[in-house]
Amino acid sequence: MKRKPMIAGNWKMHMTTKEARELVAGILEQTSDVNFDRVDVLMAPPFTALSAVAELLSGRPVFLAGQNMHWEEKGAFTGEISPVMLKEVGCSHVIIGHSERRQYFGEMNETVNKKLRAAFSHGLTPILCVGESLEQREANQTFSVIEEELDKGLNGLTTEQVQSMILAYEPIWAIGTGKTASPEQAEEVHAFIRGWLEKRVGKEAADAIRVLYGGSVKPENIEGLMAKESIDGGLVGGASLKAESFAQIVKRGL
Ligand code: PGA
């Protein structure tokens, strides 16, 4: 059984509010012939553009996500954004544990776990990112790194919570490098993740969980990736910043 695919755009630190409005308008126009019953589309703009994007997406079947958040509802945490704030502005999802957060901003599996719990208690669907670096892959540590990220990140979550979340496998060596994992390389890790999920929540629940692939997804490679049994969509960085390439990925990912 194939799950409903999701194509998610992670804009990272790109797009002023003005640019964001133009991009969303372009994407909506170029996906006007897409049947959204067959694919979930999500956009994760920077915090400053969320409300403008939410306004443009209102009434449209497109999901809005934060790229990160703090686990507390409010408090003296200068520079942070809370789950309540994301909800209020119209987010249904939040990306948690992106490798750039782990690599540059000290995100740990323990804080990932707190953020996942906070997302659930505020009714946000988390998209948890996991993935290995090039050195880890070359040292044959891919599976152990991912296993640790899953074990610690999902620690204490209920079967229901795990079942309702979205995972993203993002090999760090493929992010922003133009070097995509081959469909076979990606599928090998996706199958490993699904096997881990099966042990954690049982086969039926694991079968319902979407695992997206991220790392240099482009219109040219989405079809090959989506043809694989365990790949349920894409988390797209660079190619989500142009209406045409993002729309093409949505269409070819069907
Ligand atoms: P990329 O980024 O598509 O630019 O490689 C993917 C991501 O980091 O989510």
Image (cartoon, rainbow, N blue to C red):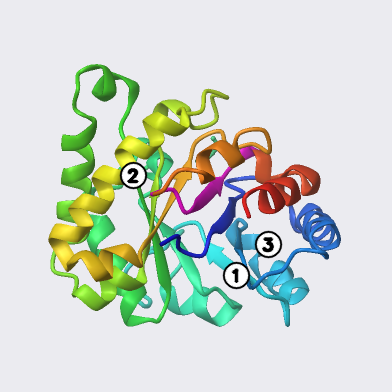
Identify which amino acid the numbered label 1 is placed on. Answer: Phe
Mark 1, residue position? 63
Viewer-nearest of labels 2 and 1? 2
In the image, taking residue 220 as reference, residue 86 lies left or right, namely left
Q: Residues within 10 Å of mark 2 (few under 14, many from 20)?
A: many
For numbered disc 2, what is the local secondary structure? helix
In the image, taking residue 149 as reference, residue 89 lies left or right, namely right
Q: How many marks?
A: 3
Of callouts 3 and 1, the N-terminal one? 3
Q: Which mark is residue 190?
A: 2
Of callouts 2 and 3, the N-terminal one? 3
Depicted 137 relative to depicted 230: above or below? above
Q: Is residue 231 magenta?
A: yes
Identify which amino acid the numbered label 2 is placed on. Answer: His
Rendered image quadrant of residue 172: top left
For numbered disc 3, what is the local secondary structure? helix
Identify which amino acid the numbered label 3 is placed on. Answer: Ala
In the image, taking residue 246 as reference, residue 86 lies left or right, namely left
* Residue 213 locus on image (x, y percent): 46, 44
Contact flag, marks 2 and 3 (Cβ < 8 Å): no
* Residue 139 locus on image (x, y percent): 20, 18
Rendered image quadrant of residue 30: bottom right
Write the start and end of the magenta stretch as one range: 230-238
Determine the residue positioned at 79% across, 54% down.
23
Determine the residue positioned at 25% across, 70% down.
204
Determine the residue positioned at 53% across, 48% down.
234
Viewer-nearest of labels 3 and 1? 1
For numbered disc 1, what is the local secondary structure? strand
Q: Is residue 125 magenta?
A: no
Mark 3, residue position? 49
